Image (spheres, rainbow, N blue to C red):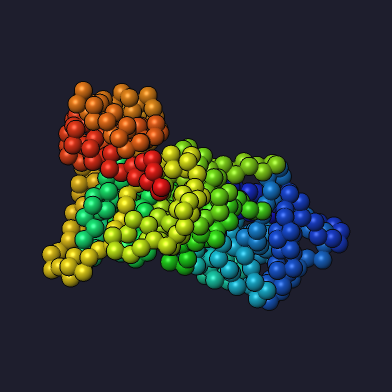
Amino acid sequence: MLAKTYGSAVYGVNAYTITIEVNVGQGTRFYMVGLPDSAVKESEQRVESSIKYHGYRMPRQKVVVNLAPADIKKEGSAYDLPIALGILQGSEQVSFPDLEKYVIMGELSLDGMLRPIKGALPIAIEARKKGFKGFILPKENASEAAIVDDIEVIGVETIKEAIEHLDGTAPIEPLHYDTRDVFFYDLDQVDADFADVQGQENIKRAMEIAAAGGHNVIMIGPPGAGKTMLAKRLSSILPPLSLHEALETTKIHSVAGKLGGNGKLIANRPFRSPHHTISDVALVGGGGIPQPGEISLANNGVLFLDELPEFKRTALEVMRQPLEERRVTISRAKVSIDYPANFMLVASMNPCPCGYYNHPEKECVCGPGVVQRYLNKVSGPLLDRIDLHVEVTPVSFDQMTADRKAESSLEIRARVIQAREIQKDRFKDTPEVFNNAMMGSSTTKELCKINEGGKVLLKTAMEKLGLSARAYDRILKVSRTIADLAASEDIKIEHLAEAIQYRSLDREGWAG
């Protein structure tokens, strides 16, 4: 007898429906076809043990399991449950009238318990799109799948529960999850607040500008100056995630298996801080079974690279294209996968190996040329993609012990949102551009016009400070953002003057 069940394969952040056909007929062997990998082929042993544990039998006949379409590689162990249910239906041990109305996924243990799967959210989205009645999956992933409306989400702990739900002997109530209420409640929950930061007003200002225009930023300063503390608070002043952004971000974390048992819609912008020993693949994504890397997990949020010169040169170089294109492409012989990578890069570094070059009190002990060699570890093309270079100085004792209450993240965020609204209106006819940092050269020339006084100031600054040619566009973009924060239609001289301050690493002789 032929039985059909439906599962799903996840490629990138999207899912594709897989038809699992089970035919039980004359013969004695078990065949699995349809381009399965080793983990899928091994399901025969898990399926046999789990159905026997619950009092059913494995047919001693010819069993053919076909995973269609046959040209897509099937990976992982999540096809165990639909294969097991198909075998039980095909061998007429059970009767499931609605079996073909469900997408079913889950890895079986030998006693029939279900283990969690990856990618439950994109699978649920695809199941609703294809018109399925429901989605049967491990209970640990049920809350994640329940983010999707208009589809029954049935969380089960054992294969027995799935059987009893499908044959009608013990139906399970679908899980309902009020996505929007929980999402909007979590929007204003801030873990790390700028109100906790004493002093560093100039750095907070730079962070506000970076958030308002979506600019990448690098902080240069001695150990203990507060670079990491400030970076961790940047995501708290970025505009709240829209529902579309939240869904996209949650899908990536779902595919990577990062949501955990209490999976729900991610309401706060992600903050990722990989260690400097990270490999190229872990940073940008890939692997034998392609998985999103740190730059994709930081999508719609912040990627913080602490001690930038300590990262491997190759790891930093592979980031150059994603920084430009806002996505990363993982290519294999038979498949090419795109992952979103629209993140803000925040980097920090010491000014020299000992950390005290240009320190107001402590003396640098690095030898001649050491500082320049240390800075040269970060390539020019990567620095070219970083708009703001900010020097961080240590906070004095008086500033640390001051009673004055600093501005909260929500107060700063309100100004950032106003500036982003101006940009949203400005770029409404340009679908690929959402903020000032994403402007191309032609758009920058058109939208960042400066008056004669501004041209004189910029020319003088470039000559006196030895600013490189690549700094020109960056200064214009940053000054446009500063003008937006001031709700000014034109870029004024004071906006340009402030933007010029944020090009420390472009100055000739900065490290010499």
Vertical side of 303 occupied by 426: above or below: above
- Which residue: 65% across, 49% down? 19
In the image, 305 versus 169, the foreground residue is 305
- Which residue: 29% across, 50% down? 207
> Residue 254 vs residue 469: left or right?
right
- Which residue: 51% across, 39% down? 321
Q: Position of residue 330 (x, y in %)?
A: 60, 44
> Does residue 233 appear in this view?
no
Q: Position of residue 476 (x, y in %)?
A: 30, 32
- Which residue: 33% across, 42% down? 503
Vertical side of 450 occupied by 10: above or below: below
In the image, 66 versus 480, the foreground residue is 480
In the image, 495 versus 80, the foreground residue is 495
Vertical side of 327 occupied by 204: above or below: below
Vertical side of 7 occupied by 140: above or below: below
> Residue 398 vs residue 256: left or right?
left
> Residue 201 vs residue 160: left or right?
left
Q: Position of residue 75 (x, y in %)?
A: 66, 54
Extreme residue toward the left, this view: 404
Q: Position of residue 275 (x, y in %)?
A: 49, 61
> Does residue 512 appear in this view?
yes
Q: Quadrant of the N terminus?
A: bottom right
